[in-house]
């Protein structure tokens, strides 16, 4: 699939609004060997790309006039109605690694030791920034938590990434965030209110019964 882009000469909010009204999305084409170029992409073609591919992870081709480029969808912006209003295409350089964000997939969670014991699993990291050649970019990074027990913690340093993929951020003793953990279930203690019986409630001065008051009157007479 080749996504056809059109060069645009007008930029700014007014030009962008007019472009969207005509059925196009403003975009920028750029890369290490490609100067930033203002372009636009048909809204329907972009929507089809988003539905059928993983354009932020899988390279695809675009054309601007007679020129073709291999790109990744580097970033995009949606409005409050979830409509795409801007996208950035990153032009790949031959033999150069790229930095992308890859989702983390936790496997065997339902059968994890801690889950069976009633524990609660928390995913502290759900995506990771990695460096890789475009052909080596994984769809996701797998973390097997079948043996995760209550009280266990898995740090980022324990993660095994595919051989040709590198974590973008350095991991060391000072920077080793938690990937996933399992803690005991939260137990809510019910408070029991004990209502005192009426006979046990002390009577204040002035709360004397009618019977006592009557007896006092009789004595006086």
Image: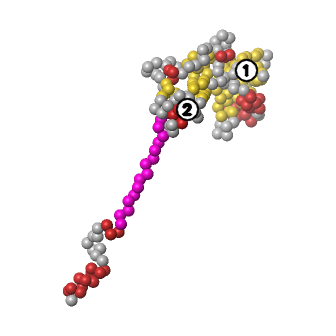
Q: Residue 51 in the image: state x and y as whole percent.
A: 73, 31
- Between 205 and 41, the residue placed more toward the observer is 205
Residue at x-position 64% and y-position 31%: 77
- Between 134 and 158, the residue placed more toward the observer is 158
Q: Residue 94 in the image: state x and y as whole percent.
A: 68, 11
Q: Is residue 203 visible?
A: yes
Local crowd at mark 1 within 10 Å, few (<14), some, or many (≥20)?
many
- Between 22 and 155, the residue placed more toward the observer is 155
According to the picture, the residue beneath numbered tag 2 turns out to be: 112
Mark 2 touching mark 1, by CB under 8 A?
no
According to the picture, the residue beneath numbered tag 1 turns out to be: 60
Q: Can residue 11 be seen in this view?
A: no
In the depicted structure, whether residue 58 falls above or below residue 219:
above
Q: Residue 110 in the image: state x and y as whole percent.
A: 58, 35
Mark sitting earlier along the chain (2/1)? 1
| Quarter-of-image position of residue 2 | top right
Residue at x-position 70% and y-position 28%: 26
Q: Residue 215 in the image: state x and y as whole percent.
A: 25, 83
Furthest residue toward bottom: 221
Q: What stretch is highlighted in magenta?
A: 180-197
Q: Is mark 2 on a helix, strand or loop?
A: loop
């Amino acid at each position: 699939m080749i996504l056809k882009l059109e060069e645009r000469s007008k930029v700014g909010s007014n030009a962008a609004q007019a472009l969207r009204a005509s059925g196009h999305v403003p975009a920028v084409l750029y890369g290490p060997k490609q100067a930033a170029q203002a372009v636009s992409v048909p809204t329907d073609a972009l929507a089809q790309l988003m539905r059928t591919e993983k354009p932020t992870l899988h390279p695809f081709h675009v054309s601007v006039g007679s020129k073709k480029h291999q790109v990744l969808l580097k970033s995009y912006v949606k409005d409050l109605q979830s409509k795409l209003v801007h996208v950035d295409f990153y032009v790949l350089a031959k033999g150069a690694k790229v930095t992308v964000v890859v989702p983390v997939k936790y496997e065997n969670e339902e059968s994890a030791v801690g889950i069976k014991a009633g524990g609660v699993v928390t995913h502290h990291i759900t995506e990771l920034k990695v460096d890789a050649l475009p052909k080596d970019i994984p769809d996701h990074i797998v973390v097997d938590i079948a043996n995760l027990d209550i009280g266990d913690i898995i740090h980022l340093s324990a993660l095994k990434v595919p051989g040709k993929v590198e974590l973008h951020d350095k991991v060391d003793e000072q920077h080793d965030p938690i990937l996933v953990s399992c803690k005991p279930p939260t137990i809510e203690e019910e408070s029991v209110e004990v209502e005192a019986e009426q006979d046990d409630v002390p009577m204040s001065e002035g709360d004397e019964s009618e019977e006592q008051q009557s007896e006092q009157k009789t004595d006086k007479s």
